[in-house]
Image (spheres, rainbow, N blue to C red):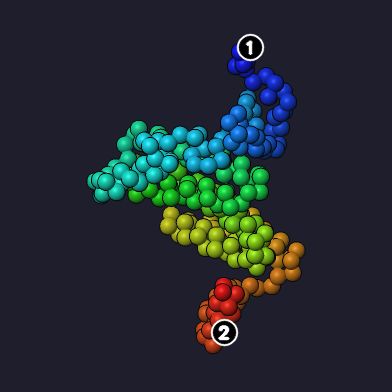
Amino acid sequence: MPHPEHLDELLRDWSYEPQALAVRIVTGGDGRDVLQMRIDMGILQLEMEGRPDGSRPKGCASYYDYLLSEAIRFGDEFVIDDDQANEADREFVQFYHRRICWLRLQNYDRAIHDADHTLVLMDLCKKYSDDDQWTLSHEQYRPFVLFHRTQAAALAALEDGGPEEAIQAINVGLDTLREVFEEYEAEEHFEDDELVARLLDLRETLRKEYEVGKTLHEQLADAVATEQYELAARLRDELAKREI
């Protein structure tokens, strides 16, 4: 008996809820695990390893890897053409979908990995495209990707190292976000940005819930800023001991 080509049973058994991101891991016919996301008119299925659609563009692990190989081959003469730009856009969308799946499933290390892939693809596109509008169409989302990455890094650190490491991860992420605002001459909007405010709220929630004062990294930054160099040296030694 031939398999039905419709999705009626799948969609009926997994209802769509507009206010919630529904994600699950299921086992495919060949025994491999795949991600599935319920969307308004169907189900997205994504591979858990490699590129989310399971393809190997031009024989490479991802389209980023292909573009990078072209940039190395042609050097400064390399310019992303329209077809390559379209393929890069496809990869941006695929990794976005998988990143939010990992966040929903609280698999923070994989969310970080996919955010990093998006960020290096953004870097490459910015460097090798001569279309400023196309570049900005991605760059406008860089703070959002960094927000996801920082959120994931903080929650992963909370699980693995505790609240102080989580707070430090947020501070590192905020510093990186500030650099982006500075690059685009929008630093005056940094403090009022919604994503920044959400990270600050998360940091203060961690402080309150776990009764954490200033971390050693924060104390070190304060000591350097106020030129308390002996205190700064002691704090550096303490940090070094923790990293052993």
Along the line of sight, the residue nearer the viewer: 10 or 21: 10
Along the line of sight, the residue nearer the viewer: 230 or 165: 165
Q: Quadrant of residue 32?
A: top right
Residue position marked by numbered label 2 in the rendering: 234
Instruction: State how far apart marks 1 and 2 are (Cα).
Output: 75 Å
* The N terminus, quarter of image: top right
Q: Position of residue 236 (x, y in %)?
A: 54, 79
Q: Residue at x 25, y 49 (%)?
A: 76
Along the line of sight, the residue nearer the viewer: 231 or 138: 231
Q: Quadrant of residue 168?
A: bottom right
Q: Residue at x 52, y 50 (%)?
A: 113
Q: Position of residue 162 (x, y in %)?
A: 67, 65
Q: Which one is in front in this view, the residue at disc 1 or the one at disc 2? A: 1
Which dot marks residue 50? none
* The C terminus, quarter of image: bottom right
| 63 horizontally vs 19: left or right | left
Residue position marked by numbered label 1 in the rendering: 1
Q: Position of residue 149 (x, y in %)?
A: 56, 53
Q: Residue at x 35, y 43 (%)?
A: 67
**Would you call the spot at circle 1 few (<14 residues within 10 Å), some (14-19), or many (20 or more)?**
few
Residue 238 to residue 148: above or below: below
Q: Residue at x 36, y 41 (%)?
A: 66
